[in-house]
Image (cartoon, helix red, strand yellow):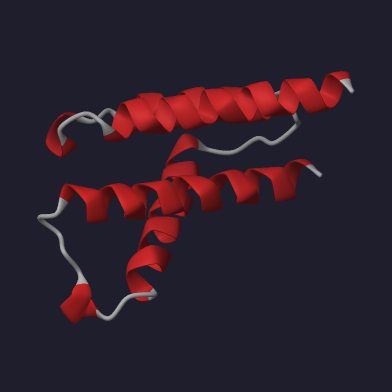
Amino acid sequence: MWILITINKDMDSITSILNETLNITPFKRDYDTSFGKIAKILKRYNLNENPRNLRFRFTLFMQEFFDSIPQDQWRLKDPIFIKQSEEFAIRKFKEWILDQVS
């Protein structure tokens, strides 16, 4: 039971870190620090992931969102569309983490 509470708490922390990062203007985002914090969380579960590899994995999940939609339907200037892509990537990233932990 304690492990489940800890994992849920850590998943909430990871979501918070990613949301805070993505709410910053893109060219001012500090991805190294954000994914460094996530790497520290993952070390609790014996997952020794390089922050840059985590960032790359997150980017691949973002790309998965865009690959699922025909390019002529991308609305890159629409904040709602961009938010959907970010939420998708966060969800997939957390699913990947849970797969690694279990």
Image quarter in which the N terminus is found: top right
Residue at x-position 53% and y-position 38%: 50
Q: Position of residue 97 (x, y in %)?
A: 64, 44
Q: Is residue 72 left or right of residue 67?
A: left
Q: Position of residue 94 (x, y in %)?
A: 58, 43
In the image as oriented, which residue stretches furthest toward the front? Answer: 80
Q: Position of residue 70 (x, y in %)?
A: 27, 81
Q: Is residue 100 left or right of residue 11?
A: right
In the image as oriented, which residue stretches furthest toward the right? Answer: 1
Image: 90 above or below 41: below
The part of the image, by quadrant, that contains residue 85 is: bottom left
Image: 60 above or below 71: above
Residue at x-position 39% and y-position 64%: 65
In this rendering, the count of numbered labels is: 0
Image quarter in which the C terminus is found: top right
Residue at x-position 32% and y-position 29%: 21
Q: Is residue 48 left or right of residue 60?
A: right
* Visible residue check, residue 64: yes
Image: 94 above or below 85: above
* Visible residue check, residue 32: no
Which of the two residues, 36 or 7, is positioned nearer the viewer here? 7
Residue at x-position 65% and y-position 21%: 9
Image: 95 above or below 24: below
